[in-house]
Image (cartoon, coloured by chain):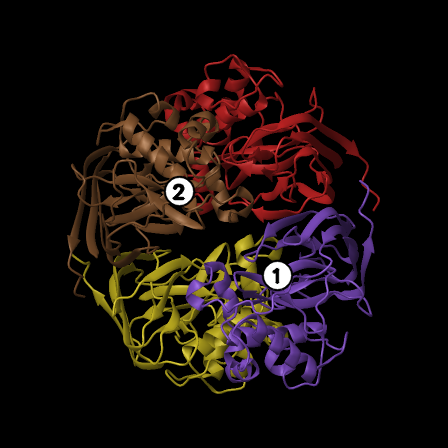
Chain colours: A yellow, B brown, C purple, D red
Amino acid sequence: MWMHTSCSLDFQIPVATPFLFMLRPRSGWQQWVGREQYVLSPSVSAVEFTDPFGNLCQRLVAPAGRFSVHTSVDVESAEASDTAPGAPFVEVQHLPDETIPFLLPSRFCESDRFTEMASSIGSGWAPGYDQCAAIVDYIRRTKRYTPGSGQQIISAGEVNEQTHAVCRDMAHLGIACCRALSIPARMVVGYLENLEPMDLHAWFEAYLGGRWFTFDPTQSDLQGGRVAIAYGRDAADVAIYTQFGAPVELLRMEVTVERRPAPRF
Amino acid sequence: MWMHTSCSLDFQIPVATPFLFMLRPRSGWQQWVGREQYVLSPSVSAVEFTDPFGNLCQRLVAPAGRFSVHTSVDVESAEASDTAPGAPFVEVQHLPDETIPFLLPSRFCESDRFTEMASSIGSGWAPGYDQCAAIVDYIRRTKRYTPGSGQQIISAGEVNEQTHAVCRDMAHLGIACCRALSIPARMVVGYLENLEPMDLHAWFEAYLGGRWFTFDPTQSDLQGGRVAIAYGRDAADVAIYTQFGAPVELLRMEVTVERRPAPRF
Amino acid sequence: MWMHTSCSLDFQIPVATPFLFMLRPRSGWQQWVGREQYVLSPSVSAVEFTDPFGNLCQRLVAPAGRFSVHTSVDVESAEASDTAPGAPFVEVQHLPDETIPFLLPSRFCESDRFTEMASSIGSGWAPGYDQCAAIVDYIRRTKRYTPGSGQQIISAGEVNEQTHAVCRDMAHLGIACCRALSIPARMVVGYLENLEPMDLHAWFEAYLGGRWFTFDPTQSDLQGGRVAIAYGRDAADVAIYTQFGAPVELLRMEVTVERRPAPRF
Amino acid sequence: MWMHTSCSLDFQIPVATPFLFMLRPRSGWQQWVGREQYVLSPSVSAVEFTDPFGNLCQRLVAPAGRFSVHTSVDVESAEASDTAPGAPFVEVQHLPDETIPFLLPSRFCESDRFTEMASSIGSGWAPGYDQCAAIVDYIRRTKRYTPGSGQQIISAGEVNEQTHAVCRDMAHLGIACCRALSIPARMVVGYLENLEPMDLHAWFEAYLGGRWFTFDPTQSDLQGGRVAIAYGRDAADVAIYTQFGAPVELLRMEVTVERRPAPRF
C-alpha cells in the first residue's frame, strides 16, 4: 500500500546555528521510497552523509531568523508488519557482526542494569521472539501510554520508575530488556498511521531467527502502516534534528501520515 | 540554480532477472536533492543499500515482460564547477585514508601502465592541479570527442590507441594518467546540461590541495550544471544498471536535463 | 621509545559463555605495534571483526572451567603526547563527518545535561583547546583521583555528584563537558606507564584544530608512554571484555607496562 | 594446527618513497593470529588503516637507502579447507549486500567478457559449488601451473590466451568465470605450506550456500595449511606492497611457511 507522510519544522533562530537533520527516509525492507521532497526555506547550502547506522544525515547552518524545513515522502509500505511467534533466540556467537553494537548498553538504554528484571519477565517463555513479546506485554501492562507527555528524554531506568510513558520511553524500556537477555535491539523513529494526535513515532526492532522484527509496545496488536526514518541504538542516535550552540525556538512541528492510492507519476 | 533531470529505461525481460540499479543521486558537495521520484512499472519489491563508495544501490528482480524504471530529480546545483589552478599535489603520505583506493589501478584504468605517458604529459607543470589540467588538455588534443560512438566499455589502454572517444573513455584515460602521477582520481557518472544528443555523462574528479575537483575532458572550459549520480573507481563501479543472468533487451533509454526555476513545493 | 605491555585475565566459567574481547591494540597515530601475542587457554576457536569505531574485536565462546586470556604487545610509542594550547575550536559545520557521532550524548556521557556547567567552566577561555584544558583543570580541582575506587560504571552526571573518581569517571566527565561545548570528544582505554597500582587506564581525546588531541584529567602535566587499545563514545563502547549470559567470575586481572629497549627481532 | 610464516622484503630506495603495505594477517574464519611481529629497519613512523575490504594497511615513507620489512606470524589454521560439493548457487536477489562488489568486473578479472566461456564450462553441472569445481578443473586442464613464471600482472583475458600460468593468473581466471555465472568471487593472497619454491600464494573464494569457500586451481585436491593475508576483488586490491613515485629496487624477498607445535607463550 502507498502512504504519504510529511514533517514540517519551523524554527526561530537567534544566531546562525549548525544543525544535523535526519529526515530523509531510505528504501529498505518492506519500504520503497517512490517520491520524496526536502525543502529548506530560506534555501541554504547543505551536505549529506551516511552515519555509522546507515542513516542519511543532512548538515547545514541555519541563518538567523525564521527557518523552515519541510519534507514529504510517498512510500510503498507493508499493510502488516511481519511477526514470527516462536522465532528462536540467536546465540551470541552466531550473531552477525553488525548486530553486536545493538547488544551493548547505550545512552538511554542501560541494559546493564536490567538483567534481573528482564530475566524475570522472560522466564517461562521460549528464548527469542516470545520473550520479546512478553517484554512488550509487560510494558503495556505496567505503563500507561500517554502520547505527548514526555519532554526531556529519559532513560529506561527512569522510565521504569514511572507509570506513564511516551512511545520513545516504552521503546527504550523494551530495548533495555531485550539486550539484557542478549537479544540485539535497536530503536526506530518514523511515521505510523492513525496516531492521535499525529506525531512522529518510535518503536523498536529485535534480531531473532536471523532477521530484525518490529515490536511496538504502544499497540496491543502490531499494526503496519509504518515508515522508518532512522535506526540507532536509542533516541540519542536518531534525533530528527540536533542543534548545536545557543538554543533555538521550535515554533511549530507538524506531521502528517495518510494512505493514498499509488501515486501517478 | 535548480535543475530537473530524469532517466527512463524500458526493458523487455525474457525471464525474471535480478538487477542492480544506481539511479538515486544523493545530496553532496554543490548538490542538494530537493525532490526526487523513482518509479518501477510494474511495481516490484526493491531494497536499497549503500555500496563501499557511498552510492545508493537498488536491488530488485524484474519480472518477465515489459519493465520500466523512471527516475527524476530536482537538484540545486552549482552554476559553475570549482576550479583551482595551482592547487598543490598532496603527497601520498598525507592523503586521507579514504582516497587511497583511488590511487590504485582498476578494471578500466590500468594506471600501472601509464607511468611513462603521464610523466611526459605532466612534466613542465607544477605537481597537482596544473598537471591534471595538462592531462585533460592532452586528451582533448589527441582524441576526438564522439558522443554515442562507444558501445562496449574499453579500458584506458585501449582508448589510448584510438582517435575517437566517448565521455567515459576520456574520463578513463584522465583517471589512469592522474593515478600514474600518484594523484587520486575517481569516476563520476551523472547528468550534464546541454549535451547533444542528451544522454548520461561521465567525467572525473581528482584530489588536490585537500579536496576533490571536477575535470571534464569533453569541455574546453569546465562548465557547471552537473548532477552526480554515482562515484567509483571507473565505469565498472558506476554502471547505472547491472543485470545478472540471461541478457535482457533495453528498448529505450531517455535522459532529460533542464534548468528550471526553484521548485514551488 | 618502545614499551612492552600485557594484560592477563583468568576466569572461572560455570557454563560455556560467549565473550567479546577488545584486547588487540592497533597501530595508529604515535603508536606502532611491532610485536604482539594473544593467547587463549584452553585454545578455542575465535573470530575477529572491526567494530564501527575501527577497533578489532575478538568473539569466542569460553568453555566451562578455568579460562585465561593473555595478551602482550611491544609498541613504539611517543615519549610525550602532543599538546596544542590555542588550537582552535572547529565550527560544527566544518567538522569531518566521522567526528559527528562524538558530539552526541552517549550511555555514560549525558552531554545534553551539561550545557550550563560546561559553558560556565569554558567561559573566559578561547574556544577550543584552552576550554578543554580548563575542563580538565576543573575536574582535577573538584574530584580526587582514586585509582581502583570504582566498581560499577557510573555516568558523568553521577560522577559529578561525587568527590572521588576513577580515571574512567574523570574521562566521562571531561567528554560530557566537551560535547556540551560542541567539541567532539571520545574515550580511550589503554595502557599508561607508572600507574600505581598498575591497571588499565582511561583518558579522552578531543578534536581541535583539525585533529584529535589527548587529555588526561588524572595528570597535572600530560605525559606520554601511552598505548591505546580501543576508542569509543564512552566506556560502553570500549569494555575490554563483555560477557553474555550467566555471570562468570574474574579470578585475576594483571596488567604490566614497562619501557624496554627496542626489541631485537 | 599451528603454522609459523614470515615475509621479508629488502629494498634499495633511491629517494624517500611512500609505501602502502598489506602484511598484517588478521584473525578470521579458521585462522587465529596468536603471535605476530612487524619490523621496519630502519624504524620509521607508520600508520595503519582498514581498507574497504577489511584489510589492515600500513602506510609509511621509506627513507633513501636500504630499507627492510620483516613480518612473521604464528597462526592456528585449519588442517583442511572446508569443501562442500553440491552447495547451491545463491540467487543474486538473496545475496548479502556485502558480496555484491565481488560480482562485478575488476581490473584483472574482466568477467563481463567471460559469459560464454563460463556458461560452457558450467553447463551440465548443478548451479553453485559444482560449477566452481568444474571451472577449477578446466583451468587445471588447460593451463600449466608454472610457479614464478609471471612478472607483470596480466588479466584473466590475457591469461586465457596462454598455456602457462602462475597462481595469481589461475585465480584471476577462476574469479572471472565465477562472476560471469553470477557467483561472487574474491581474491586471496596469503601463505600456503609446501610450495616449491616457497613464495606468497594466491587463490580465490566463492560465495556458495551462504558462505565463502576456498578454491585453488593450482591443486588437484584442495589442501589446508593456509594463512590469508588480504582479500580483494583481484590482485590490484591485494598487492602486499604498493610503491608510489620513482621506482625502487626490491633486492630480496623471502617467504617461509612451516608447521610448528603450538607456541609456548
Q: Report x, y in % for residue C127.
A: 51, 74
Task: Between residue C166 and residue D219, name the one nearer to us.
Answer: C166
Task: Between residue D193 and residue B40, name the one nearer to us.
Answer: D193
Residue D93 image-quadrant placement: top left
- What is the three-letter code of the residue carrying label 1? Tyr
The N terminus of chain A: image quadrant: bottom left
Q: Disc 1 marks which residue?
A: C231
Q: Report x, y in % for residue A211.
A: 47, 56
For the point 74% across and 55% down, the residue is C63
Q: CA distance from mark 1 to mark 2?
A: 36 Å
- What is the three-letter code of the residue carrying label 2? Tyr
| Marked residue chain, label 1 | C
How many circles with numbers are drawn on the protein?
2
* Horizontal relation, residue C251 to residue A173: left or right: right
- The answer to whether one can see residue A109 in this image is no
Residue A247 image-quadrant placement: bottom left
For the point 15% across and 56% down, the residue is B260
Q: Report x, y in % for residue A82.
A: 39, 60
In this view, C53 is above or below B209: below
Q: Disc 2 marks which residue?
A: B129
Q: Residues within 10 Å of mark 2 (few under 14, many from 20)?
A: many
Q: Report x, y in % for residue C242.
A: 66, 63
Residue B178 image-quadrant placement: top left
Give the secondary structure at mark 2: helix
Task: Between residue A90 and residue A258, name the one nearer to us.
Answer: A258
| Marked residue chain, label 2 | B
In this view, A169 is above or below C189: below
